[in-house]
Amino acid sequence: MKQLMLAILQLIALAVVDSYGNETARLVHGNSTSIKKNPHCASIKVLGKYMCGGTIISKQHILTAAHCVYDLYNDKNLLESTTVVTGTTYLNKGGETHKVEKVYFHERYNPHILAVNDIGLVKLLKTIKFGPTQQRIMLPKSDIAINENVMIAAWGRTGFQKPLHNNLQKLDMKVMLPTTCQARYDKSSLTMRIHKNDFCTYIKNGIGLCNVYNVTLYLIKCLNIT
Protein backbone atom coordinates (compact mmCIF):
# COMPACT_ATOMS: atom_id res chain seq x y z
CA MET A 1 0.00 0.00 0.00
CA LYS A 2 2.89 2.38 0.73
CA GLN A 3 4.05 2.06 -2.87
CA LEU A 4 0.57 2.86 -4.13
CA MET A 5 0.47 6.05 -2.10
CA LEU A 6 3.83 7.21 -3.40
CA ALA A 7 2.59 8.34 -6.80
CA ILE A 8 0.18 10.89 -5.38
CA LEU A 9 2.60 12.09 -2.72
CA GLN A 10 5.08 12.58 -5.51
CA LEU A 11 2.69 15.07 -7.07
CA ILE A 12 3.84 17.72 -4.64
CA ALA A 13 7.23 16.25 -3.86
CA LEU A 14 8.03 16.72 -7.51
CA ALA A 15 7.83 20.47 -7.00
CA VAL A 16 11.09 20.55 -5.06
CA VAL A 17 12.11 23.67 -6.94
CA ASP A 18 9.44 25.84 -8.48
CA SER A 19 9.58 27.18 -12.01
CA TYR A 20 12.65 29.31 -12.64
CA GLY A 21 14.03 29.10 -9.14
CA ASN A 22 11.21 30.53 -7.00
CA GLU A 23 10.95 29.23 -3.45
CA THR A 24 8.35 26.49 -2.97
CA ALA A 25 8.16 23.21 -1.10
CA ARG A 26 11.47 21.46 -0.51
CA LEU A 27 12.05 17.98 0.86
CA VAL A 28 14.15 18.83 3.93
CA HIS A 29 16.13 16.39 6.10
CA GLY A 30 15.32 13.35 3.98
CA ASN A 31 17.46 10.23 3.70
CA SER A 32 19.42 9.30 0.59
CA THR A 33 17.84 6.67 -1.61
CA SER A 34 18.43 5.31 -5.11
CA ILE A 35 16.59 5.30 -8.41
CA LYS A 36 16.48 1.49 -8.31
CA LYS A 37 14.30 1.75 -5.21
CA ASN A 38 12.25 4.55 -6.79
CA PRO A 39 12.37 3.95 -10.57
CA HIS A 40 9.27 6.10 -11.11
CA CYS A 41 11.11 9.33 -10.21
CA ALA A 42 11.87 11.83 -12.98
CA SER A 43 13.23 15.36 -13.19
CA ILE A 44 11.88 18.09 -15.47
CA LYS A 45 14.37 20.60 -16.85
CA VAL A 46 13.99 23.83 -18.83
CA LEU A 47 17.02 25.03 -20.80
CA GLY A 48 18.97 22.33 -18.98
CA LYS A 49 18.10 23.71 -15.54
CA TYR A 50 16.18 21.62 -13.01
CA MET A 51 12.66 22.96 -12.58
CA CYS A 52 10.46 20.25 -11.02
CA GLY A 53 10.25 16.56 -10.33
CA GLY A 54 7.75 14.10 -11.71
CA THR A 55 6.43 10.57 -11.50
CA ILE A 56 6.30 8.08 -14.37
CA ILE A 57 2.73 6.80 -14.73
CA SER A 58 3.01 5.31 -18.23
CA LYS A 59 5.64 4.84 -20.93
CA GLN A 60 4.82 8.28 -22.29
CA HIS A 61 3.35 10.27 -19.38
CA ILE A 62 4.87 12.03 -16.37
CA LEU A 63 2.66 13.19 -13.50
CA THR A 64 3.68 16.58 -12.15
CA ALA A 65 2.24 19.79 -10.69
CA ALA A 66 0.23 22.26 -12.74
CA HIS A 67 2.43 25.17 -11.70
CA CYS A 68 5.38 23.33 -13.25
CA VAL A 69 3.83 23.19 -16.72
CA TYR A 70 1.48 26.19 -16.75
CA ASP A 71 3.91 28.56 -18.51
CA LEU A 72 4.97 25.85 -20.95
CA TYR A 73 1.42 25.38 -22.21
CA ASN A 74 1.30 28.66 -24.15
CA ASP A 75 5.00 29.09 -24.90
CA LYS A 76 6.16 26.86 -27.76
CA ASN A 77 9.80 27.93 -27.47
CA LEU A 78 9.86 27.17 -23.76
CA LEU A 79 8.16 23.83 -24.36
CA GLU A 80 10.77 22.90 -26.97
CA SER A 81 13.47 23.72 -24.41
CA THR A 82 11.93 21.34 -21.86
CA THR A 83 13.24 17.82 -21.26
CA VAL A 84 12.50 15.02 -18.82
CA VAL A 85 15.32 12.93 -17.34
CA THR A 86 14.60 9.42 -16.04
CA GLY A 87 16.64 6.51 -14.75
CA THR A 88 19.14 8.31 -12.52
CA THR A 89 19.63 8.90 -8.80
CA TYR A 90 21.38 12.19 -9.49
CA LEU A 91 20.22 15.55 -10.76
CA ASN A 92 23.40 16.37 -12.68
CA LYS A 93 24.40 13.12 -14.35
CA GLY A 94 23.23 9.82 -15.79
CA GLY A 95 19.84 8.64 -16.95
CA GLU A 96 17.99 9.12 -20.21
CA THR A 97 16.81 12.48 -21.57
CA HIS A 98 13.40 12.71 -23.25
CA LYS A 99 11.90 15.48 -25.37
CA VAL A 100 8.43 16.74 -24.52
CA GLU A 101 5.51 16.64 -26.96
CA LYS A 102 2.79 18.34 -24.94
CA VAL A 103 1.78 19.40 -21.43
CA TYR A 104 -1.60 19.46 -19.67
CA PHE A 105 -2.93 20.86 -16.42
CA HIS A 106 -6.17 20.53 -14.45
CA GLU A 107 -9.01 22.41 -16.14
CA ARG A 108 -9.86 24.14 -12.86
CA TYR A 109 -6.30 25.09 -11.96
CA ASN A 110 -5.85 28.77 -11.14
CA PRO A 111 -2.23 29.97 -10.74
CA HIS A 112 -3.45 32.74 -8.43
CA ILE A 113 -4.96 30.30 -5.92
CA LEU A 114 -2.38 28.45 -3.85
CA ALA A 115 -2.22 24.67 -4.09
CA VAL A 116 -5.70 23.95 -5.49
CA ASN A 117 -6.08 21.54 -8.45
CA ASP A 118 -2.31 21.76 -8.84
CA ILE A 119 -2.02 18.71 -11.10
CA GLY A 120 -0.17 18.60 -14.39
CA LEU A 121 0.85 16.04 -16.96
CA VAL A 122 3.76 15.85 -19.39
CA LYS A 123 3.48 13.77 -22.57
CA LEU A 124 6.83 12.65 -23.95
CA LEU A 125 7.65 12.67 -27.65
CA LYS A 126 8.82 9.04 -27.48
CA THR A 127 8.16 6.21 -25.07
CA ILE A 128 10.35 5.26 -22.12
CA LYS A 129 12.01 1.85 -22.22
CA PHE A 130 11.09 0.31 -18.89
CA GLY A 131 13.73 -1.46 -16.82
CA PRO A 132 15.25 -1.61 -13.30
CA THR A 133 15.80 2.19 -13.16
CA GLN A 134 12.82 3.34 -15.25
CA GLN A 135 9.36 2.10 -14.35
CA ARG A 136 5.84 3.44 -13.92
CA ILE A 137 4.25 3.51 -10.50
CA MET A 138 0.80 2.11 -9.83
CA LEU A 139 -1.74 4.74 -8.85
CA PRO A 140 -3.74 4.15 -5.64
CA LYS A 141 -6.99 2.21 -5.93
CA SER A 142 -8.35 3.25 -2.55
CA ASP A 143 -8.52 6.31 -0.32
CA ILE A 144 -5.62 7.11 1.96
CA ALA A 145 -6.47 6.43 5.59
CA ILE A 146 -5.72 8.76 8.48
CA ASN A 147 -2.47 7.78 10.26
CA GLU A 148 -1.48 5.64 7.29
CA ASN A 149 2.25 5.37 6.65
CA VAL A 150 3.31 6.98 3.38
CA MET A 151 6.63 7.72 1.71
CA ILE A 152 7.83 10.77 -0.21
CA ALA A 153 10.67 10.54 -2.75
CA ALA A 154 12.17 13.69 -4.27
CA TRP A 155 15.33 15.67 -4.75
CA GLY A 156 15.59 17.82 -1.65
CA ARG A 157 17.84 19.57 0.84
CA THR A 158 20.01 18.50 3.76
CA GLY A 159 18.46 21.24 5.90
CA PHE A 160 16.26 24.31 5.85
CA GLN A 161 17.52 26.87 3.28
CA LYS A 162 20.49 24.62 2.45
CA PRO A 163 21.65 23.97 -1.14
CA LEU A 164 19.70 21.48 -3.25
CA HIS A 165 20.88 17.91 -2.70
CA ASN A 166 22.14 16.15 -5.83
CA ASN A 167 21.00 12.71 -4.62
CA LEU A 168 17.43 11.46 -4.55
CA GLN A 169 15.93 11.68 -1.05
CA LYS A 170 13.06 9.97 0.78
CA LEU A 171 10.96 10.52 3.89
CA ASP A 172 8.54 8.25 5.74
CA MET A 173 5.53 10.13 7.12
CA LYS A 174 1.98 9.72 8.44
CA VAL A 175 -1.27 11.21 7.16
CA MET A 176 -3.27 13.53 9.43
CA LEU A 177 -6.91 14.65 9.43
CA PRO A 178 -7.72 17.73 7.29
CA THR A 179 -9.25 19.37 10.37
CA THR A 180 -6.05 18.81 12.35
CA CYS A 181 -4.05 20.21 9.47
CA GLN A 182 -6.32 23.27 9.25
CA ALA A 183 -5.95 23.87 12.98
CA ARG A 184 -2.16 23.89 12.67
CA TYR A 185 -2.31 26.39 9.83
CA ASP A 186 -4.73 28.58 11.81
CA LYS A 187 -2.14 28.81 14.58
CA SER A 188 0.59 29.84 12.13
CA SER A 189 1.15 33.09 10.22
CA LEU A 190 0.06 31.40 6.96
CA THR A 191 -3.49 31.71 5.68
CA MET A 192 -4.36 28.39 4.09
CA ARG A 193 -7.70 26.81 3.28
CA ILE A 194 -7.57 23.01 3.61
CA HIS A 195 -10.14 21.42 1.31
CA LYS A 196 -11.94 18.18 2.07
CA ASN A 197 -10.04 16.38 -0.71
CA ASP A 198 -6.65 17.51 0.61
CA PHE A 199 -4.52 15.83 3.21
CA CYS A 200 -1.47 16.69 5.26
CA THR A 201 1.48 14.87 6.74
CA TYR A 202 3.59 15.90 9.69
CA ILE A 203 6.70 14.64 11.48
CA LYS A 204 8.10 17.67 13.30
CA ASN A 205 9.09 21.24 12.57
CA GLY A 206 11.72 21.64 9.87
CA ILE A 207 11.29 18.20 8.33
CA GLY A 208 9.29 17.30 5.24
CA LEU A 209 8.16 19.27 2.20
CA CYS A 210 8.44 22.67 3.76
CA ASN A 211 9.77 26.17 3.44
CA VAL A 212 8.88 28.18 6.53
CA TYR A 213 5.78 26.32 7.60
CA ASN A 214 5.25 23.68 10.27
CA VAL A 215 2.84 21.51 8.35
CA THR A 216 3.39 19.77 5.05
CA LEU A 217 0.42 20.01 2.72
CA TYR A 218 -0.32 17.56 -0.07
CA LEU A 219 -3.10 17.90 -2.59
CA ILE A 220 -5.25 14.97 -3.67
CA LYS A 221 -7.43 15.76 -6.67
CA CYS A 222 -8.86 13.76 -9.57
CA LEU A 223 -7.46 14.18 -13.07
CA ASN A 224 -9.22 12.44 -15.96
CA ILE A 225 -6.97 11.87 -18.97
CA THR A 226 -8.55 11.12 -22.32
Image: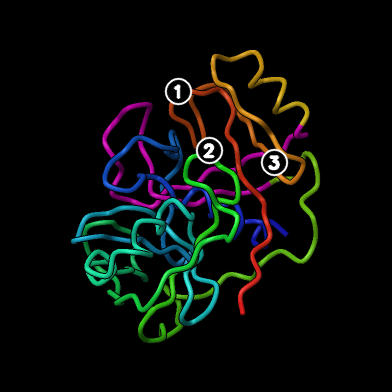
Q: Which residue is mark 1?
A: 212
Q: SS of the residue at dot 3?
A: strand
Q: Quadrant of residue 195?
A: top right
Marks 2 and 3: which is nearer the front?
Answer: 2
Whole-percent x and y of residue 61? 48, 75
Which residues are the magenta region?
150-178
Q: SS of the residue at dot 1?
A: loop
Which label belongs to residue 139? none
Q: Main secondary structure of the magenta part?
A: strand
Q: Which residue is mark 3?
A: 199
The residues tagged by marks 3 and 1 sit, at their Cα atoms, a distance apart of: 19 Å
For the N terminus, the quadrant is bottom right
User: Residue at (50%, 37%) from the top-left corner?
Assistant: 209
Question: Is 5 left or right of 85, judged from the image as shown?
Answer: right
Residue type (three-letter) at the residue carrying disc 2: Leu
Are the residues flagged by discs 2 and 1 in contact, CB closer than 8 Å?
no
Please rate how many residues cluster around mark 2, counting C-alpha atoms within 10 Å: few if below 14, some from 14 to 19, many from 20: few
Residue type (three-letter) at the residue carrying disc 3: Phe
Labels 2 and 3: the sequence-earlier one? 2
Whole-percent x and y of residue 101? 36, 79
